[in-house]
Amino acid sequence: MRFTTAIALALTAVAGIAFTSPASAGILDTVKARGQLLCGVSGKVPGFSAPDAKGVWSGLDVDYCRAVAAAVFNDPEKVKFVPVTTTERFTALQSGEIDVLARNTTWTFSRDANIGLDFVGIMFHDGQGFMVNKKLGVTSVKGLNGASICIQNGTTTEQVVSDYFTANGMKYEPVAFESADEAAKIYDSGRCDVYTTDASGLAARRTTLSNPKDHVILPEIISKEPLGPAVRQGDQQWSHITRWVLFAMINAEELGVTSKNVDQMKASKNPDVRRLIGEDDSVYSDKFGLTKDWAFRAIKLVGNYGEVFDRNVGPATALGLERGPNQLWIKGGLLFAPPLR
Amino acid sequence: MPFSRYLRDRKTRGYAIQAVVLAVILLGGTWLILNAAENLRRAGIASGFAFLDKPAGFEISFKLIDFSARSTYGRAFFVGLTNTLLVASLGIVFATVLGFVVGVARLSRNWLLSRLAAAYIGTIRNIPLMLQLMFWYIAMLTPLPLPRNALNLADLFFLSNRGLFMPRPAPLDDFWPVAAAIVAGLAAAIAYALWTRGHWRRTGRRLPLLWPVLALVVLPAAVVRLIGGPALDFDIPKLAGFNFAGGIRIPPEFLALWLALTLYSGGFIAETVRAGINAVAHGQVEAARALGLPAGPTMRRIVIPQAMRVIIPPMTSQYLNLLKNSSLAVIVGFPDLVAVFAGSTLNQTGQSIETLSITMAVFLTISLAISALMNWYNRRVALVER
Amino acid sequence: MTDRFFLREAAEPVLPAPRTTVGAAGWLRTNLFFSGWGALVTVIAVALAVAIFLPLVDWAIIQAHWTGETRAACLDAEGKKAFGACWAFIEVRFSTLMYGFYPVDERWRVNLFAGLTLAALVLPSLLSGLGRIWGTRFLALAVLFPLGWLLLHGGVLGLPMVETSKWGGLMLTLIIAGSGMVCSFPLGILLALGRRSELPVIRTASIVFIEVVRGVPLVTVLFMASVMLPLFLPNGVTIDKLMRAIVGVSLFTAAYVAEVMRGGLQAIPKGQYEAAQAIGLSYWRQMRLVILPQAMRIVIPGILNTYIGLLKDTTLVAVIGLVDLIGIIAAATADPAWLGFATEGYVFVGLLFWVLCYGMSRYGLRLEYTLAKATRR
């Protein structure tokens, strides 16, 4: 039976590496013990999360996770980005394979109530749009009666487009694929007249079409798609940390605190700024789980919301998105974070 | 009896081993289920099958039964199931025909034909089906021209990247007498064919078959048609807006899946057929030749019936493979059971355990049904020994 | 009187064979134009062959673009995609196709592992005895694969850690297929023995497992491994995604191996079992020393066929987001610098699979022939 013993030993050895240690402690403790944040991302959407040719990750979702890592570890590189498919994303979060899901996921009632997710906030105010080939000469969604539409299955997009066309008495042919990549690629081949997804996604995908200039994004936005990070339900402390890192990034922009001036800001007299960067710890409590300068670390090492937006999807990037609804509320946008007090 | 004797006793040890295995299975199963229950409860995930009655909220493009966004997930399940059954059964029929043709061609005396068949079998069987599917869909069908530049056959058939369009027969009010005449003609033709066969057995003389049968089928219908006027119209596809309207449409997703499944399984069935024919004792062919039977009837009446006994068991597993391979529909966006139920429904409801279990159970049931059917057929053709 | 008898003393000169049966003309006549119908079929076959092969050769070889650093190499004067395959694309992406996103500086580990595996497959041929060769090979691989995992994954002995999400391309395909083969083999044997066991509980459990697994598509098994399995583990315990895929593939293949194995076990005459029992061997010794060595000779070709299927089926892991060869092609064709060359990518990957699978099946035929020698008289 040496043969069986050898195999048993071999399998045990493999299992030993493959299993990570079980932990009944809170997520924060697990993350600290692991020394790494596990961040579930799409991995294929330029501007939101994608590795470059050298394997360096960048994007809005990616920077959010880096900010969480900076707040926890004082090191934005202590993140492992785990690409998850649309189908796996919720299970991956539920089962603890990832600590945060930052994968342009829409915050909806059913996901909040039935799927065991806890959305921490809105990272990006988006809405569903349509992209068509210029040659079709279509200028409005109303002109799309009878069109074939390339779509990703299992997304809010799939249901929203159905609602919209039904409400307007129009017909369409859905061609649904497992991955957004494939849907975009098949649209590019001419199989579909229309490609639909969140407006930001359209802008991102357009950069990867064979002739980006041949395609226009129609003006109508037919839904609200608040995209935000989510964590699993049942761990209040972790929900608070992930939520307030996002709020801190938004508040920092509002208060004019950037990664460059955050050190000088320590001398600021503004009580809001002082509370944000931990100089004034009157509102701070140990229950939060991080040291009082958590937000300082996130801002210094990653940046405020505006910096992150401009760096990844802003007008100077390939996506070239305007702030639009993602402008601060004081500047006429929808971006609004509860005060840190 | 000392305890160690018990251990050496075969019977006792058998019971002990079974008890241990049973305990491991039961405990392991319970452990998994408890884990799942705990995980679902902790994460606040809904469970149970109530979602089947809720509206799905998405459209499905290819459906054999009525479905709209307001239909339930349960109905979406049936749309997926019927689509899977359609593509699998069409695939099985055409792959069988193709497999027999190629398998016989492989054994042909014609060197070139045999080499061509061998090349086909050798290529198809050694390349993953998924790649072949992508080849047909991405490299062959989606690059076809847009509808307005569609490949056009006699203004009746159109092939574009939206699929294959063809005329659809549309019966008019006067259709039923013609239909009745056709049915009557068919019945008469079948009766005649059976009678000639009996006549051949009794007298050894063959009566003409083809012309009388054709006449019996066509003439009554033609007469009724002449008396009653036009009975059948054809709905011919016309370019309208983005796409063709009217006619029958086969979307490229279905075409790609069906082509890939047929060609792939056809290659495997051809090998099965070749092996089956080779297994028939050579004396059988020589005996047939000695009796003066030509090559065609020798194949049809002597070789194939005997080869079937060898062919059917492996053919059954090819059919099962084809059914299971049809789940690759998900790659080309064809809404089969896996795409609709283990894809869209799973994602929309988040109930992975329920949707995946149902999907797997259904495949298992269809597989067992096909096996049972083929086993029954196998018993019928099996050699009856005295 | 001498004329009354004719006695032939010298042989009549041998006439040449009729012209129609020798040489090129004869070959054509016997093999291609043996009858009117035969000639017609030949003409059709020639037309078919010409219609398929000429454009293929034209596309893949004659008008192909072999070198270049960017998409421009494969465009015509107007900047449109030119006819003819763009093999430059494969050239540029070759290393990603082989190693995925495995860090360049660490690729020696992959090469080392590949070398060791090759050695484990080739070296035992220097020993004698076919049955022994496969036993040795299998043991070598069973030891090598877990060690290989350590080597590739790193994080021990000062090797930098390389996450499995960076593994990809041919390397990933072969790792999944190889691990699947190594794990499913012993599992399949146990299941086959279980199915023939006299103990009803074990027999039933084996039958249920085998039939259920054989009745469902691999896609659903992989979905289960990626979406459902994590929910069945205790809170906080996670298994690497690649590992889950390997477990799924191994269990799936084990059921098929078990059925092939059962065929082999059934072919062993009952006398062999009885004789083994008669000399007082325990159950496991009966199997190991008497039954399995004989059954193995019958089933090796069948198992090899199952493994060819496994190798082809590994392409399905792309569905759960692992970047195998197909995933790499998908990623590469999304790169704006190389848009629109998916066909070349898929054709290349298809060719790669064809070489591997065809090689395995030829080896299987040879093995079948060699193994049959033992019983041929």
Image: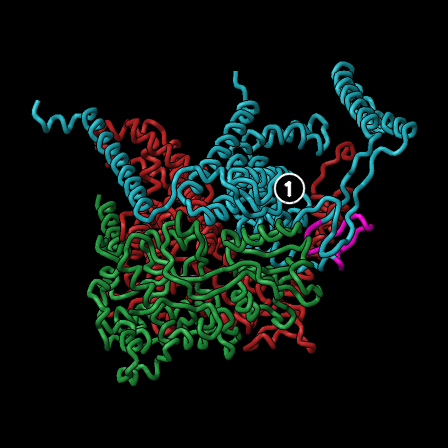
Chain colours: A green, B cyan, C red
Picture residue at 7% right of the left edge, 25% below the top: B2
Q: What stretch is highlighted in magenta?
A: B148-164
Q: In this picture, is C177 found above or below A69?
A: above
Q: Which of C8 and C360 is in front in this view?
A: C360
Magenta span contains residue B160: yes
Question: Is C97 left or right of B333, judged from the image as shown?
Answer: left
Q: Neighbour class for label 1 at 10 Å: few (<14), some, many (≥20)?
A: some
The image quadrant of residue B202 is top right
Q: Mark 1 points at which residue?
A: B98
Picture residue at 72% right of the left edge, 28% below the top: B293
Name, please, the residue furthest toward the left: B2
Secondary element at tag 1? helix
Q: In this picture, is B351 found above or below B218?
A: below
Name, please, the residue furthest toward the top: B202
The image quadrant of residue C88 is bottom right
Q: Which of C319 and A254 is in front in this view?
A: A254
| Amino acid of disc 1 | Leu
Q: Is residue C269 visible to us here?
A: yes
Question: Is B321 left or right of C297, judged from the image as shown?
Answer: right
Percent x, y of residue B15: 22, 26
Q: In which quarter of the image is the N terminus of chain B?
A: top left
Picture residue at 75% right of the left edge, 46% below the top: B246
